[in-house]
Amino acid sequence: MPMDANEIERLIKSGIPDAAVTIRDLAGDGDHYAATVISETFRGKSRVQQHQLVYEALKGQMGGALHALALQTGIPDA
């Protein structure tokens, strides 16, 4: 069963409370999303570490209910 964009956002924000999250359904099928996640939590972390934090927040849904996620992460502008 596909995962709802609101659920993806909820999971990310539950794991990264200060995150600003934008989700887009890329194919209209509920299986292929793009997410932009901006958080102060990412400051000083590599891009790989930032992505790992997001994947941890998704609680194992990647590859299961969430088929594909194009992920962009960053820190807030000063």
Image: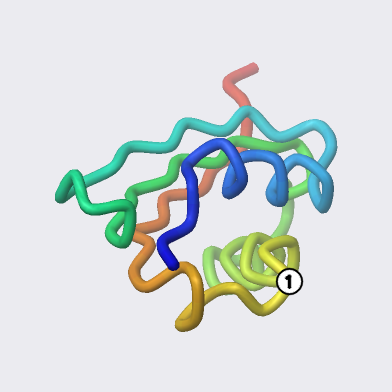
Q: Residue at x 19, y 44 (%)?
A: 28
**Residue 48 horizontal/vertical position (percent):** 55, 73
Q: Is residue 47 above or below residue 20?
A: below
Q: How is the image coloured?
A: rainbow
Of the 4 image quadrants, the one containing the C terminus is top right
Estimate the x, y position of residue 70 in percent, counting from the top left: 33, 59
- Tell me: residue 35, above or below residue 62: above
The amino acid marked with disc number 1 is Lys
Q: Is residue 57 left or right of residue 21?
A: right
Of residue 19 and residue 74, the one placed in the foreground of this image is 19
Rendered position, 48 above or below 41:
below
Q: Is residue 62 left or right of residue 12?
A: left
Question: In the rendered view of the protein, which quadrant contains the N terminus?
Answer: bottom left
Residue drawn at 34 percent across, 69 percent down: 68
Q: How many marks?
A: 1
Residue at the disc numbered 1: 59
Which residue: 22% across, 53% down? 29
> Left or right: where does residue 16 sit relative to residue 60?
right
Quadrant for residue 46, please give it: bottom right
x, y percentage for residue 51?
57, 65
Q: Image quarter for residue 49?
A: bottom right
In the displayed image of the protein, which residue is found farthest to the top?
78
Secondary structure of residue under mark 1: loop
Which residue is drawn at the image coordinates 41% and 56% (left, top)? 71
Q: Answer few, some or many: residues within 10 Å of disc 1's Cα (few below 14, many 20 plus, some between 14 and 19).
A: few
Which residue is at the far front?
A: 1
